[in-house]
Amino acid sequence: MDTKHVDWRSMRDESAPAAGHEARQSGDERDEGETETESAEAAVAERTDLVYDEQHGEWVDPETGEILREDEIDRGPEWRAFDAAERDQKSRVGSPTTTMMHDKGLSTNIGWQNKDAYGNSLSTGQRQKMQRLRTWNERFRTRDSKERNLKQALGEVERMGSALGLPDTVRETASVIYRRALDDDLLPGRSIEGVATAAIYAAARQAGVPRSLDEVRRVSRVDKMELTRTYRYVSRELGLDMKPADPAQYLPRFVSELDVSDDVERRARSLLDNAKRQGIHSGKSPVGLAAAAIYAGALLADEELTQSEVSDVTDISEVTIRNRYRELLEATQKSGERAVGSTA
C-alpha cells in the first residue's frame, strides 16, 4: 500500500502568517471596541441629567428613555419582597449591629426553647447538653467586668425605654451616652442603674420627646434625688448639649392620652408661646405649664376636661395646675389676647 508523507511542519509554517494576521485583526477590533466603550462611558459620566434605576442597575436618559449604561453591579438581594414579614423570611443575613447590646449584636445567642429545627422537643440528654452550651456561651459573651457592667446597664436602658414608650432611636442614644460614661470612668461611686436612668432621661430630652423626672423615676430602680444628682454629673462631665425643656414638647403626648381635639392642642400651644414671650415659664416645671395649658385650651375650645383628669395623666397635682392656669390667664390678659374664663 502506498503511503503519502505529509510535512506537518511546513503546513504549520505556511499557516502561521494567516493566523497571525487574523490575531492582529481580532486585536485591532478589540482595541477599537474598547476605545468606543471608553468614549461612551466618558460621555455618560459627563451628563448630569441621567436617571439611575437602582432596581436594574441602569442609567437612563429621562427624555428618550434610552438605556445608556447597564453594566452596574447590583449589590442588593436577588429576591423581591413586598412587606416586612416577607423580607425577614427571605433574608439570609443577620441583624445589623446595634449599640443597644453590649457586644453590638455580633455574638451568637442560643435560644431557650429546647426544640430542634423541626419543632420537635429535645431528649433529656440533649437538653442537658444545650444547657451546658448556653452557660458557656454566656460566659464567653461577657469576658470581663466591663462587659458585664455594660450588659446589665443596657438591659436597664431597654427595659425603661420600653416602659416609657420611647422609640429605638432614643434608646440607641441612651446606650451611646452610657458607653461614653463607662469609657470616661464616670461610674465609680455611682450605681449602674443610676447612670443608666440618667442616660435615658438625657436621651429623651435630646430627641425632643422628654419625660418628666417623676415619670422616669417610676420605671427606674433609683430615687428622684439620685437620678437628679447623677443626671447633672453625667451631663456636665460628658458636655451634653442639653437645652431647657420646652413645655410645648409635652403637649402631643398628653393631648393624645387625654383624647382631646387638635383645637385644644393649638390653643394650648398659643398660650405657652405667649407665656414664653413674657418669660413667666422661667423656673417653673415645664410639665406643670403643659398641663395647665391643656386645661385652659379645653376651656377655650368648650370641651369637657376636668383638672382631675389632667392631673391623672400628667402626674401634676391639681393645686399646681390651678396655679399655673392663673399665671397663664394673667399673661394672656397682659398681652391683650382673648382672656380665658375665670373658672378654676
Image (cartoon, rainbow, N blue to C red):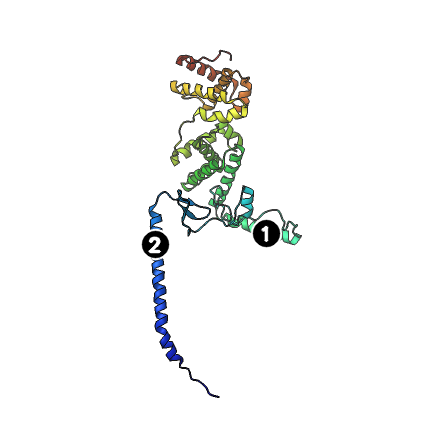
* Numbered label tally: 2
**Would you say residue 146 is visible in this rendering?**
yes
What residue is pinned by disc 1? 132
Q: Which amino acid does label 1 sit on?
A: Arg
The vertical placement of 218 against 101, above or below, is: above
**Would you say residue 191 is visible in this rendering?**
no
User: Does dot 2 land on a helix, a strand or a loop?
Assistant: helix
Q: Do the residues labelled 2 and 1 touch (CB within 8 Å)?
A: no
Q: In which quarter of the image is residue 202?
A: top left
Q: Where is residue 276 in the image (x, y as percent from the top left)?
A: 40, 20
Q: Where is residue 186 in the image (x, y as percent from the top left)?
A: 42, 38
Q: Which amino acid does label 2 sit on?
A: Glu
The numbered mark, 2 or 1, whose residue comes first in the sequence reads 2
The vertical placement of 20 against 340, above or below, is: below
Residue name at image x 56 percent, y 44 percent: 86
User: Does dot 1 land on a helix, a strand or a loop?
Assistant: helix
What residue is pinned by disc 2? 38
The vertical placement of 250 against 169, above or below, is: above
Q: Where is residue 2 in the image (x, y as percent from the top left)?
A: 46, 87
| Crowd band around label 2 with a 10 angstrom C-alpha radius: few (<14), some (14–19), many (20+) | few
Q: How far apart are marks 2 and 1 (CA)?
A: 61 Å
Of residues 51 and 97, the one nearer the viewer is 51
Give the side of residue 68 with respect to residue 121, left or right.
left
